[in-house]
Every structure is written in C-alpha cells, then in structure tokens.
Image (spheres, rainbow, N blue to C red):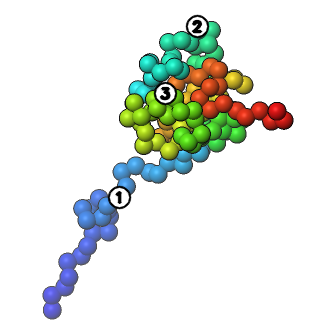
Amino acid sequence: MTSKPKVPLSPEANPAVKLPRARVEDVASARPSWCFGLLDWDAAWTWDKMKKHDMRQVLTRISNMETMSWREVEQRTGSHLVSVDQIIPDARERLCQRKLDDLSDLFSLRVTAKERIWGVRRGSVLHLLWWDPEHQICPSIKRHT
C-alpha cells in the first residue's frame, strides 16, 4: 500500500498556497497622505496663482490633517467626495484634456470656508489636482435664496 505524499502545512513551504502580499487597508481609519504628480499647472485653478500666505496656510492645514484618519478629515473638516457630474463643465473638460475622464468622483478637501483643494483619492492617498480659492469648481447652492 502506497501512502500519499504529505502536503506541507506551512504556506511558505507550499508554493501552491497563495498569500496576499499586502493586507487590505481600512481607508477610513488610515491617515491621509499626499501625492503631487497630478498637479495641474495649466488649468484655471492652477497652483502657481497661489499667494505665499495661502501656500503656508494650505501646507499647514494639510500637514495637520496627517494626524487624523480619513474618517476624521471628512467629519471634522467638511471635506468629501464629489461626483464628477456635479462639477462645472470647464473642470470636466479639463479632466478630459488630462485623460482623467474615466473618474467618477473627485475629492474636495476643505481648507477654509471658501478655499478647496481638489484631488483624486486612491486608497489613503490624495493625488492633488487643483487649487480652488474661490470655490468655483463645485459652487455651493446657497440656502434660502
């Protein structure tokens, strides 16, 4: 009587057993980080129109947000995802020009009551796109008007 070969119990010893290389991240509890590769220097909402005072304020604001989770950023700052359908036509056109027209939403990061940073959120990383100091990309509809 021949016995079957024993299958190793440890995954490291058995190449047929596949293990995930990275654990699935709970994005809501992860801390935000920033990526600058998508900065749009040719849009109406370009970063080079930012004043020195605004730059210091923005960098201080987002560095403070690094101490929070994404859940806290959304709950405490009023930052949130916005459907691309809700942004102004010029911004949608700019996404097409940048070959980003496959996006369904953008993230609006609230800096002040009016000022916003727009970006593409991928996992816990916000890829910064536009500086919107006048809240033009997705204007708020004022209540009681």
Q: Residue at x 66, y 30 (%)?
A: 139
Q: Which residue is mark 2?
A: 52
Work out whether 5 lies above or below 66. Answer: below
Q: Is residue 74 left or right of residue 37?
A: right
The answer, for residue 108, to whether it is visible in the render is yes
Foreground disc of the pair 3, 1: 3
Which kind of residue does numbered mark 3 sit on? Leu
Marks 2 and 3 close (CB-CB < 8 Å): no
Work out whether 61 lies above or below 143. Answer: above
Residue extending farthest to the bottom is 1
Q: Alpha carbon of mark 3 to alpha carbon of mark 1: how far?
A: 35 Å
Q: Residue at x 31, y 61 (%)?
A: 18
Q: Residues within 10 Å of mark 3 (few under 14, many from 20)?
A: many
Looking at marks 2 and 1 on the same chain, the residue that comes earlier in the sequence is marked by 1
Q: Residues within 10 Å of mark 1 (few under 14, many from 20)?
A: few
The answer, for residue 65, to whether it is visible in the render is no
Q: Which residue is mark 1?
A: 19
